[in-house]
């Protein structure tokens, strides 16, 4: 308890000193973070390999490249992001200076996730630094190699008082959440998300949650199944299915179910070869607890492909389930693993009805050559984001919002705005007092009529 108080208190004292408010300081810290990523690339890749069996090329593209792009964008746009933004004035304020001034929130807490343990800590950290905040960083303890590395590296490159790292598990996080922060960003599951929100409520601290959900994927009969299944296979089995906006299940007409299965099987062989387990491009489940949870979802299911598993290495082969019942266990929770259920629906009407009966998804995917059908799916459903005829792509367009609906809450793509307060400012002079007499007592009908 005392240790957490000391860490947060030190960060608040450093913030109150005002040194992180200047653009020069923020830019200096962002450049230092960029240097860290570039100089320690091998160490970062080694930690990803140890924790998730991520190969060099995929680990670089999934984790490091995104961080470097975010850093480049932040350093390029920081002056304009931090600049006062003039607003329109009316007749009574036309002589005044009125603008919105973005200012830092204070001390923020970032609780990272284990499925992308580097990028999901670094990207919000970049936004918080660019906005001028002090940041307490809590990497996920589940990826212990990455947590240890982040704890070792950040103090070597960044201001140690402003950007401390806290490692540990549930006890350390529980104590950390007892402290007062000015904003908390958490990436993970809804169970812990509720705990974070409850702790934050005691201090009326704003919270941003990235919680995932079951993202449906509808395949229309009128589409190129080979292309659709290749794109779905890539998005589903990337990172061994441990991606928050991965397709969670497929909805399709019964007449094309077997063809969908065969196309996915062919793509899996194209991607990972005959022996998936030996492929350097196929990751592993993060730990034995999640391994057992995912295997439990297969009980009583019809396995059309895959199903092989090795607990010692936390390997689960890419798996396809067919003729899945909507009431089955695999449809009750986010799978977050390499298991893809296929449910059959008669038409798009039934697909839309099925989607709308469930929690609003984080992502929704629709594969069809019929643009009218795609627009109908968009207009008659609700989700955080939607991509037609591909996977994930809505999440990588900088100007598209990335904020959730219902239980699927995500931080905005513009993280600087997440960690900034838009302060309303108006500056006027002491002249033209005659105009102000209209608002002063004593009141009269003449003043009202004017």
Image (cartoon, rainbow, N blue to C red):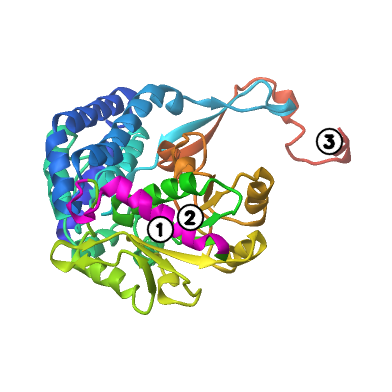
Label ID, residue 447: 3
Q: Residues within 10 Å of mark 3 (few under 14, many from 20)?
A: few
Residue identified by numbered label 1: 211
First in sequence: mark 1 vs mark 2: 1
Residue 204 picture quarter:
bottom left
Q: Is residue 388 left or right of residue 212?
A: right
Whole-percent x, y for residue 437 in the image: 74, 31
Q: Secondary structure at mark 2?
A: loop
Q: Position of residue 379 (x, y in %)?
A: 67, 51
Mark 3 vs mark 2, foreground winner is 2
Prevailing secondary structure class for the magenta stretch in the rendered image = helix
Q: Does the segment drawn in magenta span residue 256?
A: yes
Tell me where the magenta segment starts and ends, as one range: 255-280
- Mark 1 or 2, closer to the camera: 2
Q: Is residue 8 above or below residue 316?
A: above
In this view, the residue in front, 296 or 119, is 296
Q: Name the disc covering residue 362, or none.
A: 2
Q: Secondary structure at mark 1?
A: loop
**Residue 25 lies in the magenta stretch:** no
């Amino acid at each position: 308890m005392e240790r957490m108080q000391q860490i947060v208190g030190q960060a608040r004292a450093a913030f109150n000193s005002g040194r992180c408010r200047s653009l020069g300081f923020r830019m200096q810290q962002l450049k230092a973070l960029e240097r860290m990523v570039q100089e320690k690339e091998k160490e970062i890749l080694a930690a990803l390999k140890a924790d998730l069996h991520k190969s060099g090329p995929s680990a670089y593209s999934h984790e490091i490249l995104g961080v470097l792009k975010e850093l480049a964008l932040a350093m390029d746009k920081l002056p304009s992001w931090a600049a006062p933004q003039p607003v329109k004035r009316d007749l009574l304020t036309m002589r005044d200076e009125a603008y919105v001034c973005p200012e830092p929130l204070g001390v923020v807490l970032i609780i990272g996730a284990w499925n992308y343990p580097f990028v999901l800590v670094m990207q919000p950290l970049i936004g918080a630094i660019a906005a001028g905040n002090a940041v307490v960083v809590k990497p996920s303890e589940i990826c212990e190699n990455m947590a240890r590395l982040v704890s070792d590296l950040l103090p070597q490159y960044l201001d140690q008082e402003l950007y401390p790292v806290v490692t540990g598990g549930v006890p350390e996080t529980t104590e950390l959440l007892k402290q007062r922060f000015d904003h908390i960003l958490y990436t993970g599951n809804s169970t812990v998300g509720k705990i974070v929100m409850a702790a934050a409520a005691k201090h009326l601290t704003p919270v941003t949650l990235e919680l995932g959900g079951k993202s449906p994927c509808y395949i229309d009969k009128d589409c190129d199944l080979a292309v659709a299944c290749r794109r779905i296979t890539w998005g589903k089995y990337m990172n061994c299915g441990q991606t928050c906006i991965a397709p969670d299940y497929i909805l399709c007409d019964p007449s094309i179910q077997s063809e969908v299965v065969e196309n996915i099987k062919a793509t899996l062989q194209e991607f990972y070869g005959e022996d998936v387990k030996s492929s350097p491009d196929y990751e592993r489940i993060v730990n034995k607890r999640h391994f057992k949870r995912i295997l439990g979802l297969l009980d009583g299911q019809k396995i059309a492909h895959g199903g092989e598993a090795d607990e010692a290495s936390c390997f689960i082969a890419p798996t396809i389930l067919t003729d899945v019942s909507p009431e089955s266990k695999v449809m009750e929770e986010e799978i977050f693993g390499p298991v893809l259920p296929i449910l059959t629906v008669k038409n798009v009407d039934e697909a839309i009805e099925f989607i709308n009966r469930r929690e609003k998804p984080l992502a929704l995917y629709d594969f069809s050559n019929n643009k009218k059908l795609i627009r109908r799916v968009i207009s008659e459903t609700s989700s955080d984001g939607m991509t037609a005829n591909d996977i994930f792509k809505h999440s990588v367009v900088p100007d598209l919002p990335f904020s959730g609906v219902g239980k699927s809450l995500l931080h905005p793509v513009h993280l600087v705005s997440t960690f900034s307060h838009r302060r309303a400012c108006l500056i006027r002079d002491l002249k033209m007092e005659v105009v102000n007499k209209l608002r002063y007592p004593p009141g009269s009908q003449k003043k009202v009529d004017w």
